[in-house]
């Protein structure tokens, strides 16, 4: 913003009439000049604050990006470790830092100190630490086959199929999720032609998401002919 008030102040060299005219004009313009000067000061301060805020936001974005990259790297490293972990064996000696997955919940744990135990890692927090691995998300629409070892987010009412249980290793998991945004959708998950879905209420060949609420369901293959929930 610019100040456009121009003064023609009186001078001692002016004659009395000119001096008075210039003096009156100068006094009349002082209010306008003061208003514009204050507005300019506010504008400058505002620009300064905005610049400082932008710099702060840029720094926060940089820090967030660095943190995200670090988390992604840690997740990738954890995923690599988890992929190579074997099933936990009771009484077997494990070195410090060794990883094994629990046959109770199929999650991977890292040994805190060298030793052996008859207690499953999921129940032995003194000796084992849960290895957290962020699962990738696959957005699914239009039906089709579900993908193992990741979160399948279903966004419509299509029909989705579990791969043949015999085609994947035993204990392969398939996670299916309905978020709140798509809770009114009613997708159908069905087993392959020779498979069945096993749950606490018995067995079936399909599972319908019709609860009209967000929910997650995990299917685990026996490596032969069934998926358990």
Image (cartoon, grey):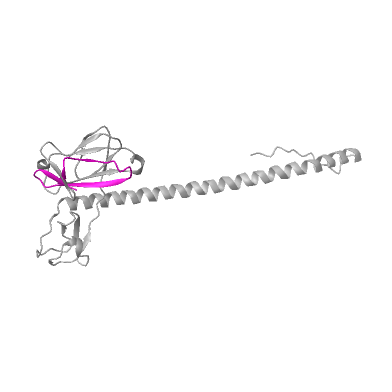
Q: Quadrant of residue 121?
A: bottom left
21 relative to 32 in the view: left or right: right
Question: 21 or 179, which is in the foreground?
Answer: 179
Q: Looking at the picture, how far across and down is residue 118, in whole percent? A: 12, 66
For this orientation, the residue located farthest to the right is 16
179 relative to 98 in the view: left or right: right
Q: Residue at x 69, y 39 (%)?
A: 3
Question: 5 or 162, which is in the foreground?
Answer: 162
Q: Residue at x 73, y 42 (%)?
A: 33
Q: Looking at the picture, how far across and down is residue 158, in whole percent? A: 26, 34
Q: Quadrant of residue 101?
A: bottom left
What segment is highlighted magenta in the picture? 203-229
Quadrant in which the N terminus appears = top right
Q: Looking at the picture, how far across and down is residue 45, in whole percent? A: 60, 48
Q: Residue at x 80, y 41 (%)?
A: 28
Q: Relative to 108, is 29 above or below?
A: above
């Amino acid at each position: 913003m610019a100040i456009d008030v121009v003064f023609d102040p009186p001078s001692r060299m002016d004659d009395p009439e000119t001096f008075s005219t210039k003096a009156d004009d100068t006094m009349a313009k002082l209010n306008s000049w003061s208003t514009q000067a204050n507005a300019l000061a506010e504008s400058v301060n505002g620009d300064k604050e905005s610049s400082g805020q932008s710099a702060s936001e840029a720094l926060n974005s940089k820090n967030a990006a660095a943190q995200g990259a670090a988390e992604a790297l840690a997740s990738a490293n954890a995923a690599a470790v988890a992929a190579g972990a074997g099933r936990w064996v009771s009484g077997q000696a494990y070195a410090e830092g060794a990883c094994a997955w629990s046959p109770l919940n199929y999650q991977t744990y890292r040994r805190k100190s060298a030793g052996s135990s008859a207690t499953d890692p999921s129940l032995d927090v003194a000796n084992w630490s849960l290895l957290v691995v962020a699962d990738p998300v696959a957005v699914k629409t239009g039906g089709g086959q579900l993908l193992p070892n990741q979160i399948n987010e279903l966004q419509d009412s299509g029909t989705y199929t579990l791969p043949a249980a015999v085609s994947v290793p035993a204990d392969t998991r398939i996670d299916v999720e309905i978020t709140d945004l798509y809770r009114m959708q009613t997708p159908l998950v069905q087993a392959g032609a020779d498979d069945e879905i096993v749950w606490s209420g018995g067995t079936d060949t399909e599972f319908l998401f019709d609860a009209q609420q967000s929910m997650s369901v995990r299917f685990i293959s026996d490596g032969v002919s069934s998926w358990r929930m």
